[in-house]
Image (cartoon, rainbow, N blue to C red):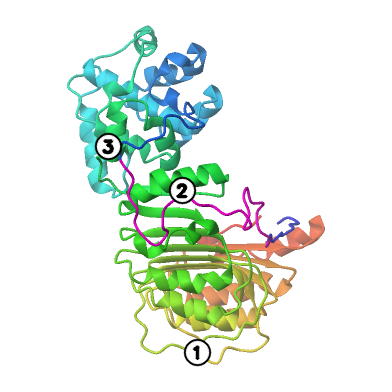
Amino acid sequence: MHNQQLYLSAGEDDMLFDDTTPITFGENKKSNCKTNKNDVPIQYPNEDKLSTLFNTTGREKNSTGPLKQWLFEHQHHPYPNETDKQELMEKTKMSLSQITVWFTNARVKMRKENKLPLNLYAKKKKKKQQDDSFHLDDTLSPPFSTQNLSFNELSTSFDNDYTSDDLSNELIYEIFDYIDYCLIYEIFVNLNLRFHSLFYESNLPLKVNFPLTSKTIFQYRCKYIINSNIKRIISLNICKYFLEFFSINLFSSLKSLTVNQIQSDKISTLLSNLICLPNFSSLSIYSSNYFQDENSIYLSIFRLTKLKLCKLTFPSGGERVPLPIAIDSYHKLERLIINGHCRLEQLNSILSYLPLLQHLSCQYLYGTGRECKEIQIAKNLTSIHLTIYRVLFEEMKLFLSKISSRLKILRMKTFDNDDYFLAEQWEELIVCHMPCLRIFDLQYSVSIDKDTRHLLIDRFSSKFWIEKQWFFD
């Protein structure tokens, strides 16, 4: 338990170009304009930023020394996990992408030289069948023999040139999936004919990050990246200016959208354009001002029938009149994250529209000083994360007791309210209404002395808390 300070930033980021600067690049934002595939610029800034990914000759030998040592020590299973990669990043000062590519190249070279363990592929393939998660390493072809390598052999082997010609197209695409597409395009499109064809003859889906940037780069990316790939893009992370030049309903394959610093009065138009997208399932909105018509925005979101995840971030302020309680709603939303001012009464109304909701997070939850007339039961809700301001414990207790009997994870953060640190009340609530609860994380922020701190923590040392193996510090 520590003293903590909470900061809420509600202003706009500094822009590298502003609303007064007209941006044009010759295309109509309402049409899907195509560019000539041969009409590619000769050069572009940052052209050599990722060139070391496919050629190790430019690196100092000392920088790859820890990688070779790790490979030698783990040659029977040369697949570093995330912790290993973080340690190697610190030792080599290389990026995560560079380390991933280095080990991929190393394994390909070992496979070609029949030096990769035979049973390794079988293990990886079996693990992949058991786990739906996708790993870059699973795309490698099976090796052919087992043969021990000495560290000197490894050092000599991987000090030689290793270029993109040794990698298959499929493997290059998998590597590209780890790096921002715009950056990849700008660096590799003019590298050689092979890379040029990889970009222009592929039908693979694209994930595009389009942040605030300079006017020149913005124009370039709109013309050469967005216009020519508009039907292939499945994920977009954009700033508010992007919507001034492209209507979002043109992106017929779009599944995920993140919009940054959008004005609240533009959100309704955006949401109405998303309705026609057949596969759209994930929405994140970061508003630069408070929602002037909050209920209208929520209702528009609920009309996106295939939406599975929704994250809303907005400053505090504005009227908070609760939505009417929904009857027989069948919305498919499974995860809702509200990073903005929300009253408990409003949150209760929102739940009536989302019968399939599994995860709920609200970072600025305020009380009403009165009981909700009818608490909505969310039968599928298993995870709740709440940061509470001025909500009476009795209000929260009633809300939690009715909301879901399947709750498995409850994380709460509150400030300067001793009622939330009454162990007996929490024990009663959990035993009677949360039989499935596995994780209970209660963060209580208050300025206290050391002795009082221990007294508060000692409340949670009864047999109930010990048997649950829930400990407070």
State yes or no: residue 186 in magenta.
Answer: no
Q: In what element is the residue under mark 1?
A: loop
State yes or no: residue 15 in magenta.
Answer: yes
Q: Is 308 situated above or below 351?
A: above
Residue at which label 1 appears: 324
Q: From the image, give the main secondary structure of the stretch colored magenta.
A: loop
Image location (x, y in percent) of residue 103: 37, 25
Query: In the image as oriented, which residue stretches furthest toward the left?
Result: 144
Q: In what element is the residue under mark 2?
A: strand
Q: Quadrant of residue 30?
A: bottom left
Along the viewing direction, whichever of 277 and 378 lies nearer the viewer: 277
Along the viewing direction, whichever of 337 and 257 lies nearer the viewer: 257
Residue at which label 2 appears: 209
Q: Point out the stretch of residues depicted in magenta.
A: 10-36
Image location (x, y in percent) of residue 276: 33, 70
Q: Is 171 situated above or below 470?
A: above
Point 25% across, 47% down: residue: 130
Whether residue 407 appears in this view of the structure is: no
- Left or right? Give the position of 83 relative to 194: right
Kindly identify the amino acid type of the residue bearing the numbered disc 1: Pro
Q: Is 130 situated above or below 441?
A: above
